[in-house]
Image (tube, helix red, strand yellow):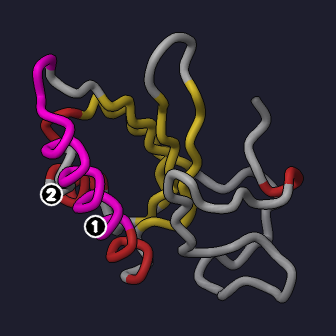
Amino acid sequence: MEFLVEFEVEVPAGTPDAEVEQHQRAESAAAAKLAEDGHLTRLWRRPLVGDGTTGIGLYRADSEAELDGLLAALPLADWLHITVTPLEAGPGCAVDRTASRAPGGPAVGRVVEPGADREPAADRLPR
């Protein structure tokens, strides 16, 4: 099954910068592992009005229960507001979701971290 997962990070007031950075590094490592294991297919960041950002991820899991376990294990889980939307293929969709990407196609399993080079505009979500 595929899921669209939206994350909004809310760092508790008074949290030391060093702790925030430690959590962010751990979160990046966890996301890379989820991508390696085939659970995190894509990840985007979208700025919010005011402070902060929202993460939007395309995840794969065998069930919502499995996805819930994956998300609960994230290092930032206690700081996240998460919205999960189960996805289904549209009518006439003949895409094999288990196949690896075609050359030049969208990146599968690539995690975009803060400060990383952005993907070509055609490969990003509209703002």
**Rendered-image quadrant of the N terminus:** bottom left
Please tell me whether residue 18 is drawn above or below residue 104 in the rendered image. Answer: above
Vertical position of residue 13 compared to residue 82: above or below = above
Residue bearing mark 2: 73
Percent across and percent down for residue 118 are 72, 57
Q: In the image, what residue type sits under mark 2?
A: Ala
Q: Secondary structure at mark 2?
A: loop
| Contact between labelled residues 2 and 1, with CB atoms less than 8 Å apart | yes
From the viewer's side, name the closer residue of 59 and 50: 50
Q: Residue at label 1?
A: 30
Left or right of 28 on screen, residue 89:
right
Q: In the rendered image, which quarter contains the C terminus? A: top right
Residue 38 is situated, as x and y percent measured from the top left of the image, at 44, 78
Q: Along the horizontal axis of the image, is 106 left or right of 85? A: right
Q: Residue at x 86, y 51 (%)?
A: 121
Q: Horizontally, is 63 left or right of 17 in the view?
A: right
- Taking the magenta stretch, the answer to whether it contains residue 4 is no
Would you say residue 28 sits in the magenta stretch? yes
Element at label 1:
helix
Residue in front for this viewpoint, 118 or 62:
118
In percent of width and height, residue 39 lies at 40, 70
Nearest to N terminus: mark 1 or mark 2: 1
The boundaries of the magenta stretch are: 13-31
Q: Residue at (36%, 65%) from the top-left corner?
A: 31
Q: Neighbour class for label 1 at 10 Å: few (<14), some, many (≥20)? A: some
Local packing at callout 2 (Cα closer than 10 Å; few below 14, some 14-19, many 20+) is few
